[in-house]
């Protein structure tokens, strides 16, 4: 009976032509792909840390399996393998190009757009599905994540597929569908670790409440599914941790060379509590998983990631803020948490709290449609029945879970907000159609929710956009003008030609509320990203001026330049097969060399510079054997450590004039023997 009711509702949409809806959904997915991939060459290789790892992984099966950062297999990347495996396979198929590494994320973004349509259309009809998919496609955080070689969009696509099988499990009551969903969540863990588990509260609570079987059986299936998730999550983890340490790379960013510690440490609790006490006394706040060190660690300003701490950032008026804090060697320089103090680092997430997502730097990434999403959740809970109600609950719990995490977690990056996009998009589609039907049917006080939602959503957008001087002169009138047209058409629809006017009013409303996120997303497409390491969207990207405090590694990365290129050429000219090209402390010190040459440049300290992948005794052995000839020391990159002290006392300093550099901007190169 319920399915017949849904069929009747669907037949009202799009002129009774479901094929038309499917074609439109494919068109929106194509739009998403264009937003994700158009002009992608501007981003170069994307994140240098992952770009170097992909080149290393394609050189041997050993490096591929253990996701080694360097060709020598000394240190591994601080992430699980699947997302990087996918990128490596694309590189093997198309060659080592930046676009080949970025293509999987662009495809995942388009696929997520289509899955958003399918998940919404299945229960709420094509009108809601198309609205949801368009909202997802134009979400700035989703576009930003789809144009980068971080793996968040791959994860999101896998989780949406898991949601599809979960919905089938609720509809059919069959265990195999729940098992498929569990397997996909476990696969998601192997893309981005605990981030994949953000979907579990929605799955567990919805199944326990709505599954059509006895509660004990529901609980048993949930426990069994959780066991499957954990088992699949740990397959690669245990394979690595049970491999003798001497036979594999050091687990990057872990405290004890195990993936288990990495899961619950650097990639776990440190995200929740915002801990930034770097191992070995070096601060690592902001140098987190996908950043290359957000400025401010006292490095010199000659090479990649050798700038001082951010001394300000772009304000919403497009002008540089005054300095908040100054970064010096070894301190947490530049990490002023006030409002926009981290603008230069592209990681201004503000202070934890209920209103965090409404701050200017975060609102523009994700929050444009939150009022409409709330409407879809609250408005329909009372009216929804059966399938529709449980889907509202599922997406409501998912949205609340992700919103709670990003509101109160201590440390994350702005593009992580793409995790909220499916919940917002689906509930926006549902809410828009619910409010439209209530307005059409003159359903008491509910008929006024449509114009009220328009006024609230457009009003908040105008307030936020007005703070950006460079766009308010034209974007504010667009939002207000389209909202006014929609309201006028709503009023006229009460007189005559109601159906045509109502649809036109709905179209103008969607254009009004989507104008802001569309332009924000478009900035990440049209302009060279200020920050490919910690990417974000916003009008400030249109400025030709660099954000104060942004270090060189955050600019579009295409390989070594300047003094670093001269140093690279010198090292290659003096390279002997079977040896290391150079050894340095931090991954970012040698990423250029790996990307350009594919030769074994080694960062013994890993991404954070604090790993213990090479002991002093091991360095002595390698130097004596001739495996290590050149050692690069950068300012703020290991000064005072026993390895650096040994090098300075027992190796000869190479004069920068030998490789044509103008000074020590590339660091200080030492030579053994």
Image (cartoon, grey):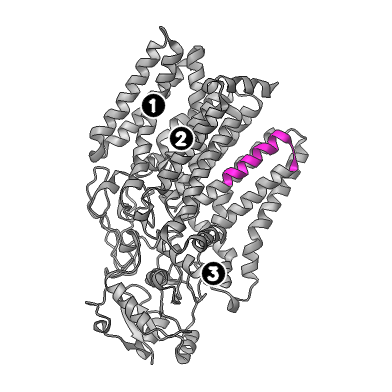
Label 1 environment density (alpha carbons within 10 Å; few <14, some 14–19, many ≥20)? some
Location of residue 489 in the rendering, given as x and y in whole percent from the top left corner? 37, 16
Q: Between disc 1 and disc 2, whose residue precedes?
A: 2
Which region of the structure is painted magenta?
A: 159-175
Label 3 environment density (alpha carbons within 10 Å; few <14, some 14–19, many ≥20)? many
Residue 17 lies, with reference to residue 345, above or below; the image says above
Q: Circle 1 — which element?
A: helix
How far, Cα to Cα, is label 1 from label 2? 20 Å
Residue 639 lies, with reference to residue 650, above or below; the image says above
For the residue pair 585 and 285, the one nearer the viewer reads as 585
How far, Cα to Cα, is label 3 from label 2? 40 Å
Residue 320 lies, with reference to residue 89, above or below; the image says above
- Kindly check if marks 3 and 2 are in contact, taking CB atoms under 8 A apart as contact: no
Look at mark 1 in the image and give the residue it sits on.
456
- Queried whether the magenta region covers residue 234, the answer comes back as no
Look at mark 3 in the image and give the residue it sits on.
251
Q: Between disc 3 and disc 1, whose residue precedes?
A: 3
- Kindly check if marks 1 and 2 are in contact, taking CB atoms under 8 A apart as contact: no
For the residue pair 196 and 558, the one nearer the viewer reads as 558
For the residue pair 557 and 354, the one nearer the viewer reads as 557
User: From this viewpoint, is residue 352 visible?
Assistant: no
State the residue at coordinates (45%, 29%).
372
Q: Quadrant of the C terminus?
A: bottom left
Look at mark 2 in the image and give the residue it sits on.
134
Main secondary-structure element of the magenta-colored stretch? helix
Q: Between disc 3 and disc 2, whose residue precedes?
A: 2
State the residue at coordinates (40%, 7%).
495
State the residue at coordinates (63%, 57%).
233
Q: For this view, does 280 lie left or right of residue 181? A: left
Looking at the image, is mark 3 or mark 2 nearer the viewer? 2
Location of residue 37 in the rendering, given as x and y in whole percent from the top left corner? 42, 49
């Amino acid at each position: 009976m319920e399915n017949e009711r849904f069929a009747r509702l669907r037949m009202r949409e799009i002129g009774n032509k479901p094929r038309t809806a499917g074609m439109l959904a494919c068109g929106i997915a194509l739009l998403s792909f264009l937003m994700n991939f158009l002009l992608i060459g501007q981003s170069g290789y994307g994140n240098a840390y992952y770009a170097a790892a992909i080149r290393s992984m394609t050189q041997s099966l050993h490096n591929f399996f253990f996701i080694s950062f360097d060709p020598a297999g000394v240190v591994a990347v601080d992430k699980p393998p699947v997302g990087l495996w996918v990128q490596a396979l694309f590189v093997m198929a198309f060659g080592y190009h930046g676009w080949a590494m970025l293509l999987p994320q662009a495809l995942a973004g388009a696929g997520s757009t289509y899955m958003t349509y399918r998940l919404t259309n299945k229960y709420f009809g094509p009108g809601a599905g198309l609205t949801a998919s368009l909202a997802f496609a134009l979400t700035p955080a989703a576009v930003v994540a789809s144009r980068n070689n971080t793996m968040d969009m791959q994860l999101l696509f896998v989780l949406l597929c898991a949601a599809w099988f979960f919905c089938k499990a609720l509809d059919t009551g069959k265990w195999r569908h729940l098992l498929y969903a569990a397997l996909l969540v476990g696969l998601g863990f192997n893309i981005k670790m605990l981030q994949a588990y953000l979907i579990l509260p929605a799955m567990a609570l919805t199944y326990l409440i709505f599954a059509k079987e006895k509660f004990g059986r529901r609980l048993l299936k949930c426990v069994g599914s959780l066991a499957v998730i954990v088992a699949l999550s740990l397959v690669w983890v245990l394979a690595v941790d049970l491999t003798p340490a001497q036979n594999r790379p050091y687990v990057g960013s872990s405290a004890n060379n195990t993936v288990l510690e990495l899961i619950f440490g650097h990639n776990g609790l440190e995200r929740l509590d915002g801990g930034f006490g770097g191992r070995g006394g070096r601060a690592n706040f902001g140098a987190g998983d996908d950043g290359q060190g957000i400025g401010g660690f006292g490095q010199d300003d000659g090479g990649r990631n050798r700038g001082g701490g951010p001394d300000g950032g772009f304000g919403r008026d497009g002008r540089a803020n005054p300095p908040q804090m100054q970064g010096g060697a070894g301190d947490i320089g530049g990490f002023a948490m006030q409002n926009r103090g981290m603008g230069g680092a592209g990681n201004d997430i503000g202070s934890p709290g209920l209103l965090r997502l409404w701050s200017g730097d975060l609102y523009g990434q994700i929050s444009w449609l939150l009022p409409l999403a709330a409407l879809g959740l609250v408005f329909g809970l009372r009216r929804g029945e059966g399938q529709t109600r449980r889907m509202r609950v599922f997406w409501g719990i998912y949205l609340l879970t992700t919103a709670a995490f990003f509101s109160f977690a201590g440390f994350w990056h702005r593009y992580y907000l793409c995790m909220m996009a499916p919940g917002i998009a689906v509930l926006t589609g549902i809410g828009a159609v619910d409010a439209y039907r209530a307005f059409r049917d003159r359903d008491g006080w509910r008929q006024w929710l449509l114009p009220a939602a328009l006024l609230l959503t457009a009003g908040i957008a105008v307030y936020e956009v007005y703070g950006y001087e460079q766009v308010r002169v034209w974007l504010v009138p667009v939002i207000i003008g389209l909202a006014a047209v929609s309201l006028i058409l709503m009023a006229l629809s009460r007189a005559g030609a109601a159906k045509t006017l109502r649809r036109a009013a709905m179209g103008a409303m969607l254009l009004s509320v989507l104008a802001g996120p569309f332009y924000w997303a478009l900035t990440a497409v049209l302009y060279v990203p200020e920050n490919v390491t910690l990417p974000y969207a916003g009008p400030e990207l249109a400025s030709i001026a660099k954000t104060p405090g942004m270090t060189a590694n955050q600019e579009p990365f295409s390989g070594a330049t300047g003094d670093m290129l001269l140093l690279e050429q010198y090292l290659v000219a003096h390279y002997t097969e079977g040896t290391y090209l150079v050894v340095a402390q931090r991954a970012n010190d040698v990423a250029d060399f790996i990307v350009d040459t594919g030769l074994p440049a080694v960062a013994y300290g890993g991404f954070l510079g604090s790993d213990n992948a090479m002991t002093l005794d091991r360095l002595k052995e390698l130097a004596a054997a001739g495996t290590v000839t050149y050692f690069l020391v950068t300012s703020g990159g290991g000064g005072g450590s026993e390895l650096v002290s040994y090098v300075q006392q027992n190796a000869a300093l190479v004069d920068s004039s030998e490789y044509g550099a103008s000074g020590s901007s590339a660091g200080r190169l030492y030579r053994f023997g």
